[in-house]
């Protein structure tokens, strides 16, 4: 199968930091289909050779394990082409179409790695230039909008030029191997399904913690905040995968239909319950990994007095028969104590304890990163004496170790899927809009409240109010248990 992959924003951050390393890995692993061309487009004039040299240089800034040696890069570089485009000029799209038509590849993937405010204009021009035939797919990177209305506006423009199955919305968390494993855990094994419900599960917590700050992205981040940056998309996508009903098939729309039902079942936020069920925070100076780091307000490009949240913890429920009454806790933040993304499923305690001492309820920990694996926490008897107390033990599955050579990074997986037309791991427009519908009352309530985000020290686990939020139900975050 021949393909042409066009990267709009071909000299930008996303391209050289994430997409090129991922494409190179796919190439190195022999997974990139033969007969492919990768065309970078951007504003300035460069030859193919100059672009290849630019990318070669940029590779020095990515993970060492992902850097090509000279011979590998020489072979990879043969796929790379460059074209100057002014994205406001219709004739430049006509020129691109001609370049693509000359070869007539089986598949054309147009990846918009530009600033999202350009998406509507680019998509309109693609439609007008006829760059939307049935063999064309367009890939859109988040953030897609900053609220429901703007997301709907982008979706309307996209729908005018492309059919839904031609528009691939990326949530790079869905490309992570651990997240695909969630599907395998739930629907490839019979063991957990009978327990995967309110009768056996007491609560579920999803943590997406980062130890990094906002770095050089202060201006973008300040307009965005943690709720839009991580909860509306990554955390909610994880929640849908945990809570969804078994889909009738491992097929894109079958899965998306079930995910959408979960989003529609989420307990709605109202002005009254936001202050009770949502905690927002902003980091102050502190210590991370033994080094002093500045507070959010001291970061470059962050306006003084900003009230943007860098931390969110919230409590919600999935209001259906399977999950009624089970709290789902979501939490994310920058400059927290560790980089740690995990889902913790707390099971109910035994109904009638017969062993002396404290009995800990069983727990399943789904580790997304930095490790990728599963821990099942149980109680066991050591067998050392008759009156002994039970001891905690756990089964530990390390997927990085088990499947080391076959592991594929998130972007690599999503790019290969985009080229092959596998849509399972892309987000449908109605899911994305429903997620905005659900978070919007939180944004509205914050706009009206004068308290602003609560302070937390960089290197901590967020404001104490986040612990109080979960303690109210008699639960605790995993690091506090
Ligand atoms: C991005 C956010 O979507 O996800 C970033 O915009 C965040 O702020 C990143 O750092 C986290 O991704 P990962 O894969 O490093 O967990």
Image (cartoon, helix red, strand yellow):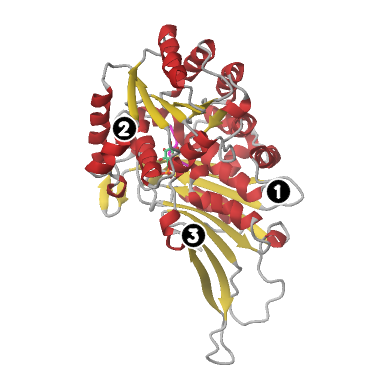
Nearer the observer, 32 or 261: 32
Gap between marks 2 and 1, in whole Å? Answer: 46 Å
**Which numbered mark, 2 or 1, is in the foreground of this view?**
2
**Numbered disc total:** 3
Disc 1 residue lies near ligand 1 with CB under 8 A = no
Q: Position of residue 411 (x, y in %)?
A: 44, 40
According to the image, label 1 marks what residue?
245
Disc 2 residue lies near ligand 1 with CB under 8 A = no
Residue 190's quadrant in the figure?
bottom right
Q: Is residue 41 magenta?
A: no
Q: Earlier in the sequence, mark 2 or mark 3?
A: 2
Residues in magenta, as a range: 308-312
According to the image, label 3 marks what residue?
373
Residue 465 seen from this side: yes
Q: Secondary structure at mark 3?
A: strand
Q: Secondary structure at mark 1?
A: loop
Q: Residue at x 50, y 67 (%)?
A: 396
Q: Position of residue 407 (x, y in %)?
A: 44, 53
Label 1 CA crowd tier, 10 Å (few <14, some 14–19, many 20+): some
According to the image, label 2 marks what residue?
78
Nearer the observer, 270 or 260: 260
Q: Residue at x 39, y 40 (%)?
A: 22
């Amino acid at each position: 199968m021949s393909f042409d992959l066009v990267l709009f924003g071909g000299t930008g951050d996303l391209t050289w930091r994430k997409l090129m390393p991922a494409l190179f890995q796919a190439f190195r692993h022999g997974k990139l289909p033969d007969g492919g061309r990768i065309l970078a487009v951007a504003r300035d004039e460069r030859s193919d050779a100059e672009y290849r040299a630019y990318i070669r240089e940029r590779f020095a800034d990515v993970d060492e394990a992902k850097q090509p040696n000279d011979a590998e890069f020489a072979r990879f570089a043969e796929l790379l082409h460059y074209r100057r485009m002014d994205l406001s000029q219709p004739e430049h799209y006509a020129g691109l179409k001609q370049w693509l038509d000359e070869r007539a590849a089986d598949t054309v993937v147009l990846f918009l790695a530009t600033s999202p405010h350009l998406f509507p204009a680019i998509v309109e021009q693609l439609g007008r230039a006829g760059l939307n035939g049935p063999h064309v797919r367009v890939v859109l990177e988040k953030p897609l909008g900053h609220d429901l209305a703007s997301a709907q506006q982008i979706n309307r423009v996209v729908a005018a030029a492309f059919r839904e199955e031609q528009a691939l919305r990326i949530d790079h968390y869905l490309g992570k191997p651990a997240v695909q494993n969630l599907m395998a855990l739930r629907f490839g094994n019979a063991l957990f399904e009978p327990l995967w419900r309110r009768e056996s599960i007491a609560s579920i917590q999803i943590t997406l913690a980062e130890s990094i700050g906002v770095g050089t992205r202060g201006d973008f981040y300040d307009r965005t905040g943690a709720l839009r940056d991580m909860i509306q998309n990554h955390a909610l996508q994880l929640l849908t995968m945990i809570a969804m009903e078994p889909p009738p098939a491992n097929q894109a729309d079958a899965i998306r239909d079930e995910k959408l039902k979960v989003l529609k079942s989420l307990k709605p936020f109202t002005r009254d319950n936001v202050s009770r069920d949502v905690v927002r925070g902003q980091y102050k100076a502190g210590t991370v990994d033994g080094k002093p780091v500045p507070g959010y307000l001291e970061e470059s490009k962050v306006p003084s007095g900003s009230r943007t949240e860098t931390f969110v913890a919230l409590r919600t429920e999935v209001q259906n028969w399977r999950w009624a009454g089970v709290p789902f806790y979501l939490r994310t933040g920058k400059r927290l104590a560790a980089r740690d993304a995990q889902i913790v499923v707390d099971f109910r305690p035994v109904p009638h304890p017969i062993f002396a001492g404290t009995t800990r309820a069983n727990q399943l920990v789904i580790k997304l990163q930095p490790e990728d694996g599963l821990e099942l926490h149980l109680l066991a008897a050591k067998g050392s004496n008759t009156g002994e107390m039970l001891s905690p033990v756990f089964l530990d599955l390390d997927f990085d170790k088990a499947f080391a050579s076959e592991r594929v990074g998130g972007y690599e997986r999503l790019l290969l899927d985009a080229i092959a037309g596998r849509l399972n791991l892309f987000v449908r427009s109605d899911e994305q809009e429903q997620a905005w519908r659900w978070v919007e009352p939180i944004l509205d309530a914050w706009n009206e409240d004068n308290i602003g985000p609560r302070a937390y020290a960089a290197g901590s686990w967020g404001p104490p109010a986040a612990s109080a939020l979960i303690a109210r139900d008699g639960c605790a975050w995993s690091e506090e248990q």
